[in-house]
Amino acid sequence: MTNTDYRLLIGGEKVEAAGGYDVINPATETLVGTAPDASVEQAQAACEAAREAFDSWSRTSMAERCALLAKVADVIDAHVDELTPIVQAETGATARVAKPLQVAQAGARFRRYSQVESNLVPLPPATMPSTPLAPGGIIGAVEHRAPVGVVAALAAYNFPVTNMAGKMAPALAMGNTLVVKPPVQDPLGVIRMCELFEEAGFPPGVVNVVSASTVEAAEAITTSPEVDMISFTGSTGVGCRIAEVAGKQMKRLLLELGGKGAAIVFDDADLANVIANVSSTWTFHSGQICTSPTRVVAQRGVYDELVGKLTGMAGYLKVGDPLEKDTVIGPVITGTHRDRVEGLIASATAEGATLATGGARPDLDTGFYVAPTLVVDATNAMTIAREEVFGPVITVIPFDTEDEAIAIANDSPYGLYDYVFSGDSARAMAVAKLLRAGNVGINTLQRNHEAAFGGFKYSGVGRDGGSWGLHAYSEMQSIMWRG
């Protein structure tokens, strides 16, 4: 699958980068392809190309823009069988994740935002008295959702193509132009997806793609005076740095950052349902999901049974080659990240927790694998309960009272996605409202993609998803008139 012909896309032209770097398959540790490594000057050129294209694109009607997004969705669907092996190789995703979620969802997101929604939000007229400022009368008003301008879109490595599509589609629908910065670890699928925009008939310069391995090139984008907004998904540390540099230029921000999801399990919960959902921290992309229920806060009446069932389940989960259909847990993204996950597991036992299962590196010749690990006898003060692991590791913490469970769940610097499992739906709803998280699932991990998505605290700034995504990539302009 080695391909050395991936290029930058700047102003409608495929441009050879200043350099290149290797993209490694995390399952085999072999070369997937050579990614273009842009220079600072090339990153700046992409921002300038996006600025040059903005005036014409923003004046294009939303109906025309959405029609092009529908064509992008069709083209991506037509290239699913080409894109999927690339993305699977560079992410290490298992077969059960790669095709339905790594690529197919990208087409679905472009199709969702191909639906035309009015940029005008009407408001009821107001009767205003005369003042020294102006004569009174009936004052009409409308909110106009105007494009922000040039948007820098930086996606996460766990679902690079789907995550990027979720940024690009609403931004383009609203009339913004883009500088796309794929994740360093797995940029190839994003580069190829963006090449397909030409086939869909997009004007040059509306979508520009800059892959780079250096902080300097990335910051050339985020600090560029040509960039009006930064949309980033990734680690909280990087997000804080982006906010720091962007704040000096008053750039608009949409930041979806880390998570440390708490799953509160009450004594009356359906344990079979709890196991099916909580175990996704192991079985869904090796736990490399910011919404994973990594902290299980279990009431003492079910604590032992829950731990026993999870321990038993872990022994049946196949860790290995993601190309094999019966593999459940593939690799984590890099050797460096595996070392980090293993270090956090070691910190758990050093701080007094117990490993009910896992902790030892799987006996595989190649690949960056971590065995499904269950940390028990834990407290919320432990490092394993406070830092985002981003790997197949579940930590179980006991509680006695409802107030204690809420306090444990909220005692975190993160607040992205929490969960409540209980047979009493009214109680679960009441508890959900007290959780300091942007999203709460009651008895399910299933998402509603029309719901606003984003986090409290260090889990981010802003909301996207559904029509909220259109709000995220627009400026609200109030227009008033006297009747």
Image (cartoon, rainbow, N blue to C red):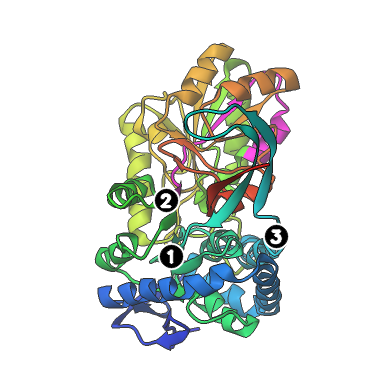
Q: Which residue is mark 1?
A: 367
Q: Pinpoint residue 92: horizontal percent, then vertical percent.
A: 51, 65
Q: Which residue is mark 3?
A: 112
Residue 81 vertical placement versus 178 (above, below): below
- The reply, left or right, for residue 452 in relation to residue 15 is right
The amino acid at mark 2 is: Arg
Identity, as a three-letter code, of the amino acid under mark 3: Arg
Q: What's the amino acid at mark 1?
A: Gly
Q: Nearer the viewer, residue 420 or 117?
A: 117
In 3D space, how far apart are the residues under numbered discs 3 and 2 (Cα atoms)? 24 Å
Q: Is residue 104 visible?
A: yes
Q: Earlier in the sequence, mark 1 or mark 3?
A: 3
**Please, is residue 131 above or below residue 243 in the view?**
above
Q: Position of residue 160 (x, y in %)?
A: 51, 63
Q: CA distance from mark 1 to mark 3?
A: 36 Å
Q: Earlier in the sequence, mark 3 or mark 2?
A: 3
**Mark 2 surroundings: few (<14), some (14-19) or many (≥20) residues within 10 A:** many
Classify residue 111 as left or right of residue 84: right
User: What residue span does the magenta drawing correspond to?
Assistant: 253-277
Q: Residue at x 35, y 41 (%)?
A: 344
Label 3 Cα neighbours within 10 Å, binned few <14 / some 14-19 / many ≥20: many
Compare residues 253 and 145 and report the one nearer the observer.
145
Q: Quadrant of residue 428?
A: top right
Which element type, helix, strand or loop, lies under badge 2? strand
Within 10 Å of disc 1 (Cα), the crowding (few <14, some 14-19, many 20+) is many
